[in-house]
Amino acid sequence: MPRPETTPSAKAPAPAAAASAGVASETVVSMYQAQKKIYARAVSGWFAGWRWALVWATQLVFYGLPWLEWNSRQAVLFDLGARRFYIFGLVLYPQDFIYLTGLLIVAAYSLFLFTAVAGRLWCGYACPQTVYTEIFMWVERKLEGDRAQRMRLDASPWGANKLARKGGKQLVWIAIGLWTGFTFVGYFTPIRDLAVAASTLGFGPWEWFWICFYGFATYGNAGWMREQVCKYMCPYARFQSAMFDKDTLIITYDAERGEPRGPRGKKADPKAAKLGHCVDCNLCVQVCPTGIDIRKGLQYECIGCAACIDVCNGVMERMDYPQGLIRYDTQNGMAQHLNRSQLLRRALRPRVLVYASVLVLILGALGTSLALRSPFKVDVVRDRGALARLVEDGWVENVYRLQLMNTTERVQRYRIRAGGLDGLRTDLGDTVIAVDPAQARWVPVAARVAPEVAAAAGRGSHPIEFTVERLVDTPADAPKSLVEHSTFVVPR
Amino acid sequence: MSDFVHSGWGWFVAIATVVSLVFCLVLLIIASRRKVMAADNSTGHVWDEDLKEMNNPLPRWWMWLFVITVVFAAVYLALYPGLPFNTGTERFGGTLRWTSVGQFEAEQEKARAALVPVYAKYAEMTAEQLAQEPVAMGIGQRLYLNNCAQCHGSDGKGSTGFPNLADGDWLGTGTHDYVKTVIVEGRMGVMPPMAAAVGSGEDVKNVAQYVLSLSGSAHDSVAAQLGKEKFAVCAACHGADGKGNPALGAPNLTDKIWLHGWGEQAIVNMITQGKNNAMPAQGRLLTPEQVHVLAAYVLSLSQTTRVAGN
């Protein structure tokens, strides 16, 4: 397992040397450090293209989904007030939270799997922190220019030009932040109503809070905090090393090929000049969004965005050197000069196979469970005030409440029967109970047995069951019934 | 609380809180510098021969987050009751004068206001009209299940000691207004102990047999004949014919409804010991509009009697 290098340690002198230097070399410094602003240089290339593809894909989904309609309602809506969660054709109840658990397990194992195979893919391409930072940096570039221009602008005195550029950037950032907050709330409040409310700023207090809070978090994290989030806040950045091993693809600098680094003319033969392929142009450091030098090896700050690969490949191309001086490779691959097919074979190691099989298993279970999901749910609650009562002719009666939950968007009709004791019957008889779409309904049921059955069963509680049958109203309905267990008490 | 705890403790808590806050800030300031080795930026601590602790300073904004929490605490303590020192006779409760009771009442007030439009259209309707309104009956059922079902059962049929609301038999008049009154004010059912007035233990048993005979239940006809005479004591409330008196709330003894149990022993117990049965008042828990709908739902229970299925 790679040990993240502690920064900013250059080649440190041996401890003995440090000790012998003695007290004289001690200095007093602040425990807190002002962070140096990072001016990441714009980068284009194969991997940057992938990142932009994922920016588009994730943000089209995030910003677009709440506007989709389905069955004349919002396609994806988490109605917290009514405790109903609509996801296209699915209507989920709070009782269905196990699906959220399943989703989280899938997300976790996907993360484990991708990380074990190819490092911080999530961080580099799809994490909202990366995606929004990419969007915010694009705005920054459009208004303030690329790295050198931004540094010049920051160093220059305040004037109309600087004010317009900086102010414009802030306005666009705030607008994106607010739009993001608005969209987020649109998953919980119908977004079209929210848009109407927006025209008069007539949001409710919680809507205001979440729009502003989520908007501010987006603005602050993507505009100001950026790599600080990854370095100091994100727990995933810290436990990723548990999923790394020496066969994990990481972004790495081929020191063997690159060193000794040094500038040279395009025509110069590096062998004659006793130089490696690294021209020490420092571009890999300039494009790095976390401000590290990849040539120092794997560091915990590296979010795996591959910007240094893209920029270095461009340089290699101009120099007519082979590409991949900085590339995705494994530690073993570097040390043992493994080729592509050897790397691929090593990708199928037990750790990866276990992650993959657990992922497939959970995905299969989740899919099956959703596909076989019952169109209704039933809960039985016994009356607790009186366990049992004697009614006319000595019959024994117990009272229950059945909660019928319609998990479809059509009216459903049900018939309820009781069984488990001889001649157990309910006061419902053949009554058909209708429940409106996505609604739940309580149905009180009194079940009774004849005195001789009660005497034969004996005093105490006896298992019984209620069978709730969904009536077939349309040809699309398959016959479906649910059995719920309860107890029947014969009084002492 | 202030009745039991000396006001000095309030000062103690307030001072300890403020001192802790200030201490946190002071600690942050005096501990904000450290010694490092100029040569290699390590702290000079070495373990296991070559494991060095490097100087990795925290970002400064992190320190500001800490300061913000202290500022937040100060603002919070000014606004909310957190510094319980006494000013004169009164305990300092924050400038917002917030209390959990106040918040609860404000929320209740808000919820009540939100319910006004829901119930508005039902207020003018009679029980019969409400019974035809599925939404009103749905509201009534939920109110019933939350407030009444604990005693009267989910199906409204009660159990021993808790009246059946679904049989159309009422100890009072059984009108919408009567049911509303009982819900709001509650009801006391009083049967005084009558054994002394009835006579000997044998007389009491005979009266019990007579009472059983009134409803055509199985009884000892000889004992019943003997008890008939003694029943005159009971007739004052239950009527000479035993059919009860709704005005007094005296139950009809000629039907087969036995709220407090059936059989000679149950009746003997009632005569000798009497009974105080209480339905607690619900007026504080429900608004008049809710009671209006709830009473209509309760009445609907006996109007739509369900037949036991086979």
Image (tube, rainbow, N blue to C red):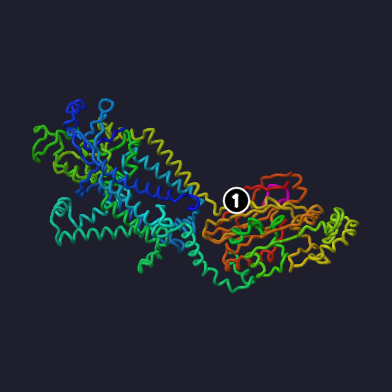
Which residues make up the magenta segment?
A417-424
Residue drawn at (50%, 62%) of the image: B108
Image location of residue A214, percent across then percent down: 35, 56
Of residue A294 and residue B52, the one placed in the foreground of this image is B52
The kind of residue tagged 1 is Leu
Of residue B281 and residue B175, the one placed in the foreground of this image is B281
In-image side of B75 versus A82 (left or right): left
Magenta stretch, overall SS: loop
Q: Which of the chains bears the disc numbered 1?
A: A
Image location of residue A479, percent across then percent down: 59, 53
Please tell me whether mark 1 sits on a helix, a strand or a loop.
strand
In-image side of A184 versus B160 (left or right): left
User: Does A126 sit above or below residue B192?
Assistant: above
User: Does B295 sit above or below residue A350?
Assistant: below
Q: Is residue A419 magenta?
A: yes
Image location of residue A422, percent across then percent down: 73, 48
Can residue A336 be seen here? The reply is no
Of residue B86 and residue A105, the one placed in the foreground of this image is B86
